[in-house]
Amino acid sequence: MCGRYTLTASPEEVRELFSYIEQPNFPPRYNIAPTQPVALVKNEHGQRHFALARWGLVPAWVKDPASFTLLINARAETVLEKPSFKVAMRHRRCIIPATGFYEWQRTVSPKQPYYIEAQDGVPLAFAGLWETWSHPEGGEIDTAAMITVAANGDMAPIHHRMPALLHPDQFDDWLDTGSVMAREAVSFLKPAPDGVLRFTPVSTRVNSADHDDPDLIRETDPIAKTQSGNLTKAGRKPTKSRKSSGPGKASKDDDQLDLF
């Protein structure tokens, strides 16, 4: 799953890539966490728009969000079938701009966080879904989740999942829910090619959402002791990747809030 990410590119750089009509101003964020506001790109009436939503999707049919499991990720393999996601996949697809994301290698102890970004440093485009939940007594809240796919070869030694990354050539079709059907759009959801991402071991300070500063993405020594007691460099391919599972009502097919 993906439970933390960054958006440190300038507002001008992000707007240039995603071509939305607004001109928002926002600060760099080095540790975006679930339940926080996240930036989205949506298509409304044939134009791209910048918007904000809470990270943690709440389907429109939920009666009480406080008792609903936090859905921060949706698996590409089941996004057309799961009741929580299938309507949004048909009608409310979005792009979540990012500069990079974090993932924790669980085969070493303590778990080693990595910062993952594009080799060329350009912003990333996460495939996402959004929904509007309406309170029975009035008021609305927009919420969102990012879509994940199986890890590529570079990512697999660290974690078995990764965000679905969209290429700029796919932006229009992904956002165009009026003309591009969900079953066609799901074909865009594939692991990124090997060689396009850079992996940097970073400090466990990122474990706390209270920390939000440039030091979080600076390289640290990746040497760690494995659970078996042997020394290894984090990032070396493990013999088997352990699948994470969410708490409470979580389905094994949905990525929930299980960060470390």
Image: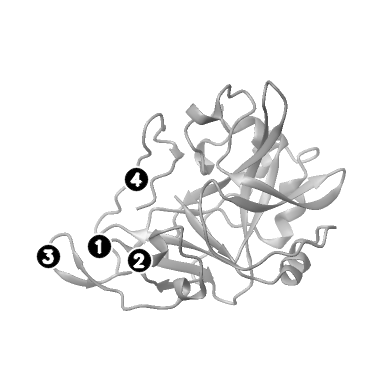
As drawn, the label of residue 229 is 3
**Real-space Cα separation, disc 3 to disc 2, in angstroms:** 20 Å
- Between disc 4 and disc 1, whose residue precedes? 1
Q: Is residue 144 left or right of residue 173?
A: left
Above-or-below relation of 229 to 69: below
Callout 2: helix, strand or loop? helix
Label 2–label 4 contact, CB within 8 A: no
Above-or-below relation of 224 to 140: below
Name the residue beneath numbered marker 4.
244
Mark toward the viewer: 2 or 1: 2
Q: Where is residue 4 in the image (x, y as percent from the top left)?
A: 48, 57
- Between disc 4 and disc 3, whose residue precedes? 3
Please tell me which residue is depicted at 47% across the width and 52% down the height of the picture: 3
**Real-space Cα separation, disc 2 to disc 1, in angstroms:** 9 Å
| Amino acid found under the numbered disc labelled 4 | Ser
Q: Where is residue 203 in the image (x, y as percent from the top left)?
A: 37, 71
Please tell me which residue is depicted at 72% across the width and 35% down the height of the picture: 91
Q: Where is residue 66 in the image (x, y as percent from the top left)?
A: 51, 30
